[in-house]
Each structure stands twice: as C-alpha cells, then as structure tokens.
Image (cartoon, coloured by chain):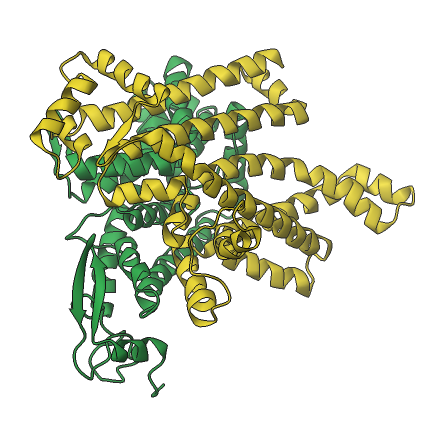
Chain colours: A yellow, B green
Amino acid sequence: MTRFIARRLAGMIAVLFAVSVIVFVVFMVLPKQNPAQTLAGKNATPLLVENIEQEWGFDDSLPQQYLTMMKKIFTGELVQYEPRIPVSDQVIEGIPATFSLTIGAAVIWLFFGLLLGYLSAIRAGGWLDRILTGVSIAGISIPVFLLAPVLIYFFANKLEIFPNGLYVPFSEDPYEWMRHLILPWFTLALLSIGFYSRVLRSNMLDVMNEDYVRTARAKGLSERQVMTRHVLRNSLIPVITLFGLDFGATIAGTAIITEAIYSIDGVGNYAAEAVAKFELPPIMGVALYGAFFVVLMNTIVDIVYAYLDPRVRLGESASQ
Amino acid sequence: MGEPRGPHRANQEHTVDTVTVDGEERDVVTPEGKPIGPQWFGADGEFFLGADSRLGRDEMVRLMYGGRTSLLVGITAALIATLLAIVLGLLAGYFRGWVDGLIARILDTIWSLPVFLIGLSVGIALAVGGLKIGPLELSSGSIWNPILIISIFTVPYIARPIRGEVLALSEKEFVEAAIAQGASPLRVMFGEILPNLASTVIVFLTLMIANSMLFEAGLSFLGAGVQPPNSSWGTMITVGVDLLKIQPLLAILPGLMIMLTVLSLNIIGDALRDALDPRGKARMDAALQFEAQASANRPVGEVAL
C-alpha cells in the first residue's frame, strides 16, 4: 500500500509539472506577439508592458522564466493588470459559490442517479425500466449549453418560479441561496443522473448473477434484504470511484459553462469573464489552481479506491 | 400557429433594443411592424426560422454556416487525433519496452489533465497571441487553433484502446508469421496490424467527432474556440444567451443542432460497430479491459459536457 501511494504521489507531481509546463509554454513561449503585451491586455500602455517585461523577466533564460512564473503562482503575486488585483484573491473569493454549485449538484445527481438506477435494476425489463432508460439516455444526450437556456427560459422567464441566475451567499439568506441555485444544480446534475443510473443498473445486474447472491436468497433473506445488503452494496464501489473523478472533472469543465450562463460569481465565471475580455493572468491562475485541485482530488480517489478494492493495487504491482 | 407568441410581442413593444455584441453595446432597431424572431414556417413569409436580432440575418442560414464550422472543426480535429493515435498506438503496442513506456506515460499524463480547463486556457492564449512553432505560424483568429487543441487533448481517448488492441494483436500467429518471413517492423505495423484495427478506428472516429464537437462548442461558447468573423454553433449560443428573454430560440436552436448532431453520431457509431463486426463489442470491451488492467488508472470516459 505504501508503495502504491508513493507511486500515485509521484504520478501526481509529474502531472502537475506537465500542467505548469503546458501553461508556461503556451503563454510565454509560443505566442507570436511579445508575451508581455499579451499579458497586459488589449489597451495596455507601453509603460505597463515594459513593467511587465521587467517583472516577469522576459530577458532571462526559459528555465529562469518558468521559475519566476511558478514563484508568482505560489506566492499569490500573479495579478491581473486592469485593474491591478491579485488573481489568488479573486479565486478564493469565488470558491464558496463554486462549491455551493458543484457540491449541491453532486448531492442531487448521486441521489437521483442511484435512486433511478436502483429502481430500474430491480424492475429490469419491465415498463418502469424502459421509461427510466429512455429518460436517462435523454439526460445523457443534452449538453449544458442547451439545457441551461431551456430551463432559464421556461422556469425563470416564462413561469417565473425561479430567479434568472445570480448567486446569493448562504450566510446572507439560506432560502434565497437555494432558490437561486436550483436551476444551476439541475443543469449540472442531469447529465450525471442519466449516466449514474445506467452505471448502477448494469453493475447491479452483473452482481445479481454472482453466487453469493444466490446463497443469500437460499439462506432465506427477503428480496429486499438481498437487494440492499448484498447487491446494492457491492455495486456501489465503482460508482463511488466514478464520482470522485467526475466531481473534479465537473468543477474544471461543465461548472465553468454553467456559472457563465447563470452569472454565478464563482471561480468558473471569473475565468469565463477573463476569457471574454481576453485577460490572460486570471486564466493562467485559474488553470493552474484548478488543475492542482483536480489532480489532487483524482489522486486521493485513486488511493481511496485502492484501499477499498485490493485488486487495484495488486493488479498494479503485477503489471510492473 | 398564427398568433405571434411571447418573443414577438416583447419585440414589438421595444422597437429599439440594446444588445451586447462582442463585448460592446449596440442599439438594434427592429424593422417597423415586422417582428424579428421565429416566424414558424414563414408566418411573414421571409425566413424559415426567423431572423437574428443583431442585423436581421436569416437564422436558418446562420445555423447552416455555423454548422459548417462546427462540423469542420469536429471532423478535422477527430481525424488528426485518430491519425496521431494510430501512429502512437502502433509504435507503443508493437515495440513495447521503453517506447511503450514513454508513449503510455505521455498519454496517461494528458488523460489525467483537467482537459477542458487546460484547453480553455490554451485556446485563449492562442486567440490572443497566435502561435509560432518553427515554420508553423497561426494567426490569433485562425480556425486551426481550436482544431489543434482539441485533437491533441483527445488523442489518449482513442490511442489507449488502440494500443491495447495492438498489444493483443501482436501476439497473434499471423504477426509472428509475417516477422518470420522477414517483414520489416513498418510493414508488420502498417500492412498486417493496421487493417485489423479498421473497425475499431472507424467506430471510435465517429464517437471522436461527436466528442470534438462538444469540446468545440464548449470552448467557443466561452470565447476560447472559434473566433469572429467565423461563427459556430457554440458562438451562436453565446450571443443567444444574452437575448434569452426576448428571443429564446436564438440560444436554443444552435444547442439543439449540437445535441442532434452528437446524438446522431453516437447512434451511427453504435450501429457501425454492430454492422462491421458482430463480435466487435465484446472485442472492444476486451481491449478496454486489457487497457484498464495495464494501467489501472481510471475508467475510459469522454469529455462530458
């Protein structure tokens, strides 16, 4: 186990290094334009450009420049230039909104995904299963940038049940916080609800054929006990792993789009606004901080999974 | 559907609207007495899906031009990714040893990146500064920027299963026979193994196109993909979302197009798999499983948007 964790951590550091190198190369080395100019933004004065050039040391060797960039990232000295605000402050400010959105959505998608998956597995082949299959396939197929406008149009603009985006902090008004987040939550969750219910269903159908399930029935457990204690429990392990990975991927993917459509002041919207204004330092910061977070999450999930399922770590050492 | 619905009335009340277009505010004057917006099956006879509220352009035509870009980016990116993946997969699966180790490590690294976030930052960096690698020079607005980004970041998605299949195929007798006859590694890889990969490649290619189109739409929606004056379904949604209240279809139609195209491609992919090789599903699952055992990393997934 220790060896496995050590290997995973080494892998994590390699990926993080790769991320930082990609960002460095793309922002500092590849552009045709002077990188100081691209960092400063469209309407920068020559003086600002010159300052940035000095500050980032664009005359130094490439490894030196890379170190300067990493130092700025870790000490929070990375700033956006118009107006001059540290990127790390903005990212920290956006974290509550981003987590409110993603964690809430995760709770919804796990609850409904598992519920629908369980229902369609115990009624496999029946009409309920068929309806749920149709619903989940439809859910998987709708991209967020279609679902969000449809939901906003019907529920916010036409029926006026829910507000049209924006974010109210939980500490200010818990009820409004929830009311503002319901549409974004479902926007983010629907795809995963469909996907998780399919995964749980097929896992459960596999497990139902196992010998120990027959044994459980043979020793006289009720159908309900067999399903919940034996089948469901054993089908959940892969779902939990998937969840750990998807949660990270959602924060670094769909959540950005969702935050942008609903104007939720999270990290994703900060990045989206910077993209719209062609401001580079915030994107650099969000990409690096976000990647660090996601890669860290994935590593933790891997380790937890290996802890839960010994086959993973044994398989790993056997293939080496 | 004679009676004009919500969006029409909203527009008739305001003959001048302020619209944010590409970051600047503009006044848009709606033509007198003629509602801008969907006029189902030409209630007014002019446009099939109505006009956009920016310049009164035919929405249907815009959808078709946008679709051209989306398809171009999706298909080209998928083709490039597939070509790269075939070469990498063949090299890794055939030579094994350190070649495989190196390629697998690179693919694993890309695989574990938060691809959309990194793609977004690369996209905007290129959209601002352009690209210059030796003789290759791309201007900042070039459509090749999103194509390159998408193809490179999606390579592992297809290269990993191909590598798995090459590993399995290279143990087969016909490969041994070819080597015994003195065929060169190139000949074995491209003459013997490659034809056996055809069904896998074709099936994955359709799925890759779908995937790349979603990726492109996500990037373009945020403004880091296709740049003006080109437009794609993704950029059309961006404009439409601002006008959701008065003209919901401007955001919903391009989204619907993306969904239908991606759905069709996925269905075609499934059907192709059944048609090309009845045992294909079992074999592909086996290839994926082989792959999963070899790296025990994470389930094969896609860029879910």
**Who's the residue at 15% across and 43% down the image?**
B141
Residue B290, position as x, y percentages in the image = 53, 29
**Who's the residue at 67% across and 39% down the image?**
A236
Which residue is the extreme one toward the right?
Answer: A220
Which residue is the extreme one toward the bottom?
Answer: B2
Q: Is residue B56 visible?
A: no
Asked if residue A223 lies left or right of residue A128, the reply is right
Identify the image quadrant of residue B1. Answer: bottom left
Residue A193, position as x, y percentages in the image = 56, 51
Looking at the figure, which quarter contains the N terminus of chain A? top right
Residue A32, position as x, y percentages in the image = 12, 30
Identify the image quadrant of residue A37. Answer: top left
Q: In this orientation, which residue lies closer to the viewer: B46 or A123? A: B46
Asked if residue A297 lies left or right of residue A94, the reply is right
Which residue is the extreme one toward the front?
Answer: A172
**Who's the residue at 60% across and 46% down the image?**
A107
Q: In this orientation, which residue lies closer to the viewer: B128 or B98? A: B128
Q: Is residue B283 placed above or below A149 in the rendered structure? A: above
Q: Is residue B241 placed above or below A73 in the rendered structure? A: below
Number of numbered discs on residues: 0
Q: Is residue B54 visible?
A: yes
**Who's the residue at 55% across and 53% down the image?**
A178
Q: Is residue A30 placed above or below B222 in the rendered structure? A: above
Identify the image quadrant of residue B181. Answer: top left
Asked if residue A125 lies left or right of residue A12, the reply is right
Residue A31, position as x, y percentages in the image = 16, 29
